[in-house]
């Protein structure tokens, strides 16, 4: 079927959200990992980079997915592309 | 409306069933603990755990039996997000993550965190790039998507081959794990263990397909998470008096680091390490001088014996000299093996690793290499996680796109619980060993040390190398798996908890094996048989074919596992790199880039997998042997990357090939472009604007 401008805008916003979340994912994983030796100051007993690898990054991942699910489920409704309500 | 109410009632019903189930399981463990107190022998506890859990899984399989295609392949698409999350967690967590992860962290310190980050961060990719779109597509397998998106059977067939390659490699490792755990739990032989475990897997997936596997995996998740948590919490109570190990082990890590600094300089430790270094150096010198050193060495021990006999030495000296002659290698080849082993003691001469330090190494260059490999491994594990078909398949089973998104959140949440805890466990066990075991007397070793070094010397062996009667850290050789397996005993818990941990490991291995076997059988029956060979097959025939194939694949995997030849740990990581390079570029570009063409995808998948496979075949010891590669490893290594991370070459190449070839081939047909639009929107209503 023919996509409307609204549909295109939905997809653009989805891409933007995806891009921003991926940037955060990249920073906590690879930037922090790359600079691990310089980030080894003590953080509640852990060296900071160790804590990030063992807990910090994981918490961020869970938060990213939670945020994405919530935002996209709202966006679906806002743009009228949500599924018939089932629950 | 009626669909909504049924789904809600179904979810409520599930919650009730699994709450009762969890309570029942806890009662079962408590009852066993009481029986243990009353004098039930340990072997019986092992048998009861094995029998009860395998029967439970089989029971769920029997109750969920089905021959309806939608039920068999995708559990009727009505698995609520939370339960699909638990099932994915169990599907995902294999014997390697349940038993091996904490051990790897114990042995490698910071570097081991690559597994923790890689195995969780991959779900961000699943959530953002794949799960919702695959759910909207809504077919049965991953090759289904490739076939529809890249129009035709070539893409589908390449997808089937890659799915089988990585899943089979992975399932062999799981069945191997099942055999090991069963053997340890019950004392049965490894082979018997493999087949008992196999029976458990088969009854479940054979009768009920995805439906049975889903509900079993939820049950298995509950067992494995309880089994993982109890010993860690207990150990945390022992060392910190706080039952939240994840929050407080920072302070324990500080103490471990302080202890490491002490041990680095301790004169007794230095003495033991020097003894190892000397022995290794002597062996190396002899290795270099082969074959001459074999004869001269033989003459030497013979002469020592003659001297001892002729010079009225004490009888002990003669016995010792005689023993040296008797144990001397038979021929030059045997000498080479023995001395190579001895030369490897160099590893034990190395100073202890600093647990919290990132990329410890002698110089800047070595640190750079370590960092590069650390990041490369994370990359491969993450992309691999987002490409393994048995995981992606699970998101077909939710009722809607919305639920698929929520379900990725729950999946990661349930996996997070274990990944969050493993580093804490590693540090706590390290603290225990560094402070309680090191420095104790050989005459008074803790009971768990004696029992485990007897069970399996490769897990724990300990010898008074410098004969001072005190345990030095350098005198302990430890295998990673013991960290999880022995924790209940280290923490002073009754044997029933050890049985529980083994049952947890068994649940982890069985659940993953279930998912993998189903993936392979479905790829063959649905994609090859139904879609390519006999499109007119009735539902019953398709499901029947799938069941028959399941049996064949399971037996083949069990047979390969029972050979015990392959380097199992390597195979598991290879599966990630292969899946990453094969599927990820084609799947993601298929959704996000309408211009990606059929030919490009096929070439991209083949190129990605081939380069990954080639790199492993030329740089990994076991694979080199398999393919008879003789050129020096150093010549084949690219940018110092280890073979375990071969996917870092395959994934970018896959993307590159798909993009370049797409640009020079004609754009896909309008139907394909419409399919892409279809998967991008959860619900495309005409006129909704």
Image (spheres, coloured by chain):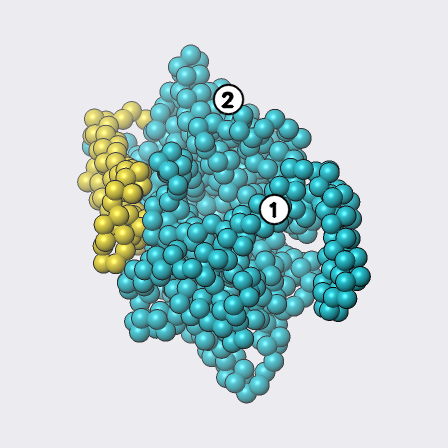
Chain colours: A yellow, B cyan
Measured as percent of width and height from the top left, residue B39 is found at 57, 85
Instruction: Name which residue lies at 61% across and 80% down.
Output: B41
Measured as percent of width and height from the top left, residue B522 is found at 57, 42
Crowding at mark 2 (Cα within 10 Å: few <14, some 14-19, many 20+):
some
In the rendered image of this protein, does residue B515 appear above or below residue B614?
below
Instruction: Name which residue lies at 76% across and 43% down.
Output: B295
Asked if residue B46 lies left or right of residue B253, the reply is right
Of residue B666 and residue B170, the one placed in the foreground of this image is B170
Q: Report the residue marked by disc 2.
A: B603
**Is there any visible trace of residue B308 in the rendered image?**
yes
Provide the secondary structure element on which disc 2 rests: helix
**Is there any visible trace of residue B517 in the rendered image?**
no
Q: In the current view of this chain or complex, which residue is farthest to the bottom?
A: B38
Q: Report the residue marked by disc 1.
A: B282
Of residue B685 and residue B318, the one placed in the foreground of this image is B318
Of residue B102 and residue B409, the one placed in the foreground of this image is B102
Instruction: Name which residue lies at 79% across and 57% down.
Output: B306
Of residue B431 and residue B607, the one placed in the foreground of this image is B431
In the rendered image of this protein, does residue B40 appear above or below residue B686?
below
Asked whether the residues under the numbered discs 1 and 2 touch, taking CB atoms below 8 Å apart as contact, a structural biologist would say no
In the rendered image of this protein, does residue B141 appear above or below residue B357?
above
Chain on which label 1 sits: B
Crowding at mark 1 (Cα within 10 Å: few <14, some 14-19, many 20+):
some
Measured as percent of width and height from the top left, residue B465 is found at 55, 61
Q: Nearer the viewer, mark 1 or mark 2?
A: 1
Mark 1 or mark 2: name the one nearer the start of the chain: 1
Measured as percent of width and height from the top left, residue A24 is found at 25, 40
- The image quadrant of residue B660 is top left
Chain on which label 2 sits: B
- The image quadrant of residue B459 is bottom right
Total marks in image: 2
Instruction: Name which residue lies at 36% across and 23% down.
Output: B594
């Amino acid at each position: 079927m023919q996509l409307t401008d609204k549909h295109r805008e939905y997809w653009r916003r989805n891409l933007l959200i995806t891009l921003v979340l991926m940037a955060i994912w990249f920073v906590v994983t690879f930037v922090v990992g790359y600079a691990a030796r310089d980030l080894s100051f003590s953080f509640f007993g852990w060296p900071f980079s160790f804590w990030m690898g063992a807990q910090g990054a994981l918490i961020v991942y869970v938060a990213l997915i939670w945020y994405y699910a919530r935002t996209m489920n709202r966006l679906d409704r806002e743009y009228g592309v949500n599924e018939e309500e089932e629950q | 409306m009626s669909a909504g109410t049924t789904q809600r009632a179904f979810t409520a019903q599930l919650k009730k069933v699994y709450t009762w189930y969890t309570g029942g399981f806890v009662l079962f463990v408590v009852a066993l603990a009481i029986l243990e107190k009353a004098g039930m022998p340990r072997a019986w506890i092992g048998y009861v755990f094995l029998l009860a859990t395998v029967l439970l899984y089989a029971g769920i399989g029997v109750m969920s039996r089905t021959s309806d295609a939608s039920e068999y392949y995708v559990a009727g698409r009505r698995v609520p997000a939370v339960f699909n999350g638990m099932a994915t967690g169990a599907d995902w967590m294999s014997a390697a993550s349940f038993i091996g992860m904490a051990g790897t962290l114990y042995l490698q310190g910071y570097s081991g965190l690559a597994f923790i980050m890689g195995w969780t961060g991959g779900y961000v990719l699943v959530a953002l790039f794949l799960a919702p779109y695959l759910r909207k597509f809504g077919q049965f397998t991953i090759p289904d998507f490739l076939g529809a998106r890249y129009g035709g059977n070539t893409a589908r067939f390449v997808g089937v081959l890659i799915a089988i390659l990585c899943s089979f490699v992975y399932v062999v490792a799981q069945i191997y794990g099942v055999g090991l755990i069963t053997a340890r739990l019950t004392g049965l032989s490894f082979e018997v263990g493999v087949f008992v475990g196999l029976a458990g897997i088969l009854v479940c997936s054979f009768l009920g397909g995805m439906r049975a596997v889903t509900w079993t995996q939820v049950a298995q998740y509950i067992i494995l998470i309880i089994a993982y948590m109890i010993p860690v919490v207990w150990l945390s109570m022992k060392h910190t008096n706080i039952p939240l190990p994840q929050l407080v082990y920072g302070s324990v890590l500080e103490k471990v680091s302080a202890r490491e600094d002490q041990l680095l300089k301790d004169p007794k430790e230095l003495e033991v390490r020097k003894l190892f270094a000397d022995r290794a150096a002597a062996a190396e010198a002899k290795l270099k001088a082969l074959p001459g050193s074999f004869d001269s060495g033989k003459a030497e021990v013979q002469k020592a014996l003659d001297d001892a006999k002729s010079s009225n030495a004490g009888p002990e000296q003669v016995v010792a000299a005689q023993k040296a002659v008797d144990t001397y290698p038979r021929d030059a080849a045997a000498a080479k093996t023995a001395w190579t082993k001895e030369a490897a003691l160099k590893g034990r001469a190395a100073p202890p690793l600093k647990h919290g330090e990132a990329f410890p190494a002698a110089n800047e260059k070595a640190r750079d290499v370590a960092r590069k490999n650390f990041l490369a491994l994370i990359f491969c594990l993450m992309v691999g996680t987002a490409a393994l078909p048995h995981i992606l398949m699970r998101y077909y089973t939710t009722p809607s796109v919305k639920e698929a998104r929520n379900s990725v959140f729950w999946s990661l949440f349930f996996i997070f619980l274990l990944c969050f805890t493993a580093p804490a466990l590693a540090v706590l066990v390290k603290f225990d060993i560094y402070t309680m075991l090191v420095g104790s007397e050989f005459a008074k070793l803790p009971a768990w040390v004696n029992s485990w070094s007897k069970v399996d010397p490769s897990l724990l062996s300990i010898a008074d190398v410098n004969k001072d009667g005190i345990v030095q850290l350098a005198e302990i050789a430890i295998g990673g798996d013991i960290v999880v397996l022995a924790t209940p005993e280290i923490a002073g818990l009754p044997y029933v908890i050890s049985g529980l941990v083994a049952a947890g490991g068994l649940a982890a291995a069985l659940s993953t094996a279930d998912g993998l076997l189903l993936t392979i059988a479905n790829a063959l029956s649905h994609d090859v048989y139904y879609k390519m060979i006999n499109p007119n097959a009735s539902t019953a025939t398709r499901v029947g074919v799938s069941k028959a194939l399941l049996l064949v694949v399971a037996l083949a995997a069990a047979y390969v596992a029972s050979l015990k030849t392959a380097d199992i740990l390597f195979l598991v990581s290879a599966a990630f790199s292969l899946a990453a390079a094969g599927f990820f570029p084609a799947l993601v570009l298929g959704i996000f880039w309408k211009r990606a063409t059929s030919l490009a995808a096929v070439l991209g998948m083949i190129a990605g997998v081939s380069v990954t496979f080639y790199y492993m075949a030329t740089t990994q010891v076991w694979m080199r042997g398999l393919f008879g590669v003789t050129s020096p490893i150093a010549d084949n290594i690219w940018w110092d990357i280890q073979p375990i991370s071969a996917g870092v070459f395959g994934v970018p190449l896959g993307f590159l090939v798909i993009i370049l070839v797409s640009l020079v081939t004609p754009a896909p047909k309008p139907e394909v472009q419409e399919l892409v639009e279809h998967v991008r929107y959860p619900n495309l209503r005409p006129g909704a604007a």
